[in-house]
Amino acid sequence: MDACESSRFESTARRGELRATLPRSFYERPTLVVARELLGKILVHDSAAGTASGRIVETEAYVGPDDLACHASRGRTPRTDVMFGPPGRAYIYFIYGMYYCLNAVTEGEGYPAAVLIRAIEPLTGIDLMRARRHKTRRDRELANGPGKLCLALSIDRDLNRADLTSGPLRIEDDGSPRPRVETSPRIGVGYAGEWAAKPWRFTVKGSTFVSKRA
DNA sequence: GTCGTGATAGCCT
DNA sequence: GGCTATCACGACG
């Protein structure tokens, strides 16, 4: 083993020791902070077919009752109820009659906010993702969008309200350094007036696994 | 690579 | 009945 290999091994081992599921306190903070800090963390889903995971490279913040792009700005309904509950749970909604989108609920109980997970860089279970996404040709397109990553990880309405701090769907910290972050306006929220322009989309600088270039 | 468009169903006026 | 925190496909180049 040469020096480079050895260093890589130690780095991996150190990461292995530090790997930990994010605690509820991670999510119980301002949504813009959580959205930024979720970049680089690892989204994991243990399903009956096997485990698949990927590094989060793109998020968006949906910040409470005044944010007209946030579903909860229309009030507490059966759909948005989970956003009013405790942080660290999954808010999964069905969109365009065909797709699911995954969010992590943030802030204190009673304040409806969440972070949309928009893209991951596949890490493990890549063959499983390819099987679930057989129409796609390139691996960088397996999960470079909110609907795509739910297909690749087999995330659907059954996991709505799931606890992300323990259980089959979770987000882990592997101890890797914080990535450089870029911001841009959120995608597809042009209806939200002045809220549409807010730079509340966060991407890992230079990642080729984001849904589109900023 | 970019652009336009159809698919499809739950949500809320 | 209109809209939607999307995606894949075909046309074009």
Image: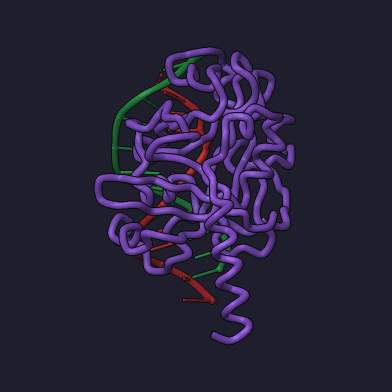
Chain colours: A purple, B green, C red
Question: Is residue A191 shown to the viewer in this render?
Answer: no
Q: Position of residue A87 (x, y in %)?
A: 57, 25
**Towards the viewer: C13 or A105:** A105
Q: Position of residue A196 (x, y in %)?
A: 68, 35
In the rendered image, which quarter contains the N terminus of chain A? bottom right
Residue A141 position in % (x across, y down): 45, 61
Q: Residue at x 55, y 63 (%)?
A: A13
Tell me what residue is drawn at x 36 percent, y 59 percent: A125
**Displayed quadrant of residue A61:** top right
- Whether residue A2 is situated above or below residue A88 in the rendered picture: below
Residue furthest to the left in view is A48
User: Which residue is located at x 41 percent, y 40 percent?
Assistant: A169
Up-down relation of residue A23 to residue A209 (above or below) = above
- Above/below status of A77 relative to A107: above
Q: Quadrant of residue A204?
A: bottom right
Residue drawn at x 62%, y 49% is: A39
Residue furthest bottom as drawn: A2
Q: Considering the image in quadrants, where does the C terminus of chain A appear? A: bottom right
